[in-house]
Structures are given as structure tokens and as C-alpha cells.
Image (cartoon, rainbow, N blue to C red):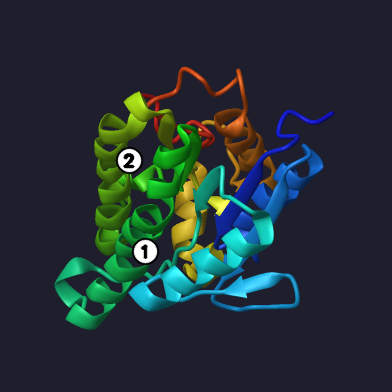
Amino acid sequence: MGVLNGRSALVVGGASGIGRAIAEAYAAEGADVVAADQSAGPDVVPVDVTDEESVAAAVAAAAARLGRIDVLVNSAGILTESPLVKMDLATWQETLAVDLTGVFLCCRQVVPGMVDRGWGRVINIASQLGIKGGIGLAHYAAAKAGVIGLTKSLALEVSGQGVLVNAIAPGPIETPMVDGITEDWKRAKRAELPLGRFGRAAEVAPTAVLLASDPGGNLYVGQTLGPNSGDVMP
């Protein structure tokens, strides 16, 4: 039996990258999993995390498949690169809408059911850049810092009702999202890392399994765990 046997999970952003790796790891540990993503497929619920009605419809579809949602993973995100002084407002707003407001909308839609049942786990994918910042990535770092703050605040609100909310702040991971960043940026970042390399999505997923598990995740409340190749050492 896997450590998530009998649990049901919705992984938003679960069609690729870290989200997909988490969805696969959850299924391997016995969970019933639904992935939601902007690019829908036969086994993926379509969702636009910036749109309130789309989020509501995706959550309803996932709940209909699963019966209930025990675990919510918010992994949808975008990553673009621009110095702040040259960044247009649309770029800033798009990143905040996907990377931060999307987390808010998904949490607001799913968490009430968890509270009603007295058990739930929410795992928000942040970034180490939300802790330390990044050149050319002020919009992304600001959004991910917001995710960390949202995670702590929601944890304070609902942990006493059996819902544990935590974040994972990975370092740079080899995913399609990171492919859009310039090679110069990636080369410089690798040189900064004590581990000397970017991580793989499969190396992040076990942290999400831990946070979703019982008893493994039972004492994590409002925490930000950092599989980040040593880029941040709190």
C-alpha cells in the first residue's frame, strides 16, 4: 500500500513539469488523481487559473470524478524574463494573475470542502526566487513571494480545522517552463548553485508526497520546503 492510498488529489498545472511529476508520484503512492491544466487532454481537466468561472468548473469536474478533494496542489505557473525598468504592465499583470491569483482562486474554491470534512492538505508551488529575488525576474519573484505569504496566512486560518497548508520552493528545475529563460541566465545560475546543477521534476515530487502523507506531513503548518540545489539556505 502506498502512503497516499485512499486519498484523492487535484493537481493544478498537472500536465507538465513539476505538476506532472507530482501527479505521477501521487498515483504511484495509491492516490486517485485528477490533473487540471490549460492544455487539456483525455485525462486532463481544462482550466484557466486566472478566470474565476473556469476554476470553479474545473474543481467541480475534478470533484465529480474523485468524489472529494483531499489534497490540492497548485503548480500552474508561467515564467518570463525582463528587467523591471523595461517591463511592460501587461507582462507584470499576466505573471501575477497566473502565479499568484490563480493560487488564491484554486484555494478559495477547494479549501471550504476540506474544512467541512475536517481534513485536507494544500501544497502550493512557490520558488526560491520568492525568498531571494532574481535578476530579470522581479515579477516572478514577487508572485512567488506572494504565494509564500498566502500559504502562511491560509495555514493560520484553517490548520485548527484539520487543513494543513504548506509551500514548496524549488530551485531551478529542468522543465518546459524554464526552457524559455536565456542560456546566459541559466549558465550563471548553475555557477551559483552549491550542487552545481538544476534539479529534475522527479526530485521535487517526493517533497509533495511527504506533505500530503499521514503521518509524514502531520506537523508541517505554513512551512516552505526548499529542494533548491542549495540556492537558498534559510
Tell me the residue that label 2 is attached to. Answer: 151
Q: Name the residue type under label 1.
A: Gly
Which residue appears at 38% of the width and 25% of the height?
Answer: 221
- In the rendered image, the quadrant that contains the C terminus is top left
Residue 21 position in % (x across, y down)? 68, 51
Q: Give the camera-side residue of 81 and 139.
A: 139
Whether residue 172 sits left or right of residue 160 in the image: it is: right
**Residue 187 visible within the image:** yes
Name the disc covering residue 133, or none.
Answer: none
Residue 123 position in % (x across, y down)? 48, 42
Whether residue 59 sits left or right of residue 95 in the image: it is: right
**Residue 136 visible within the image:** no
Query: Please, is residue 37 above or below residue 24 in the view?
Result: below
Q: Kindly indicate whether the residue at mark 1 contacts the one at mark 2 (C-beta within 8 angstroms).
A: no
Mark before the other along the chain sequence, 2 or 1: 1
Tell me the residue that label 1 is attached to. Answer: 102
Which residue appears at 71% of the width and 34% of the height?
Answer: 4
- In the rendered image, the quadrant that contains the N terminus is top right
Q: Give the camera-side residue of 123 and 179.
A: 123
Q: Name the residue type under label 2.
A: Thr
Which residue appears at 73% of the width and 28% of the height?
Answer: 3
The kind of secondary structure element at disc 1 is: helix
Whether residue 71 sits left or right of residue 7 in the image: it is: left
**Which residue, as the protein is rendered here, is positioned at the far right?**
1
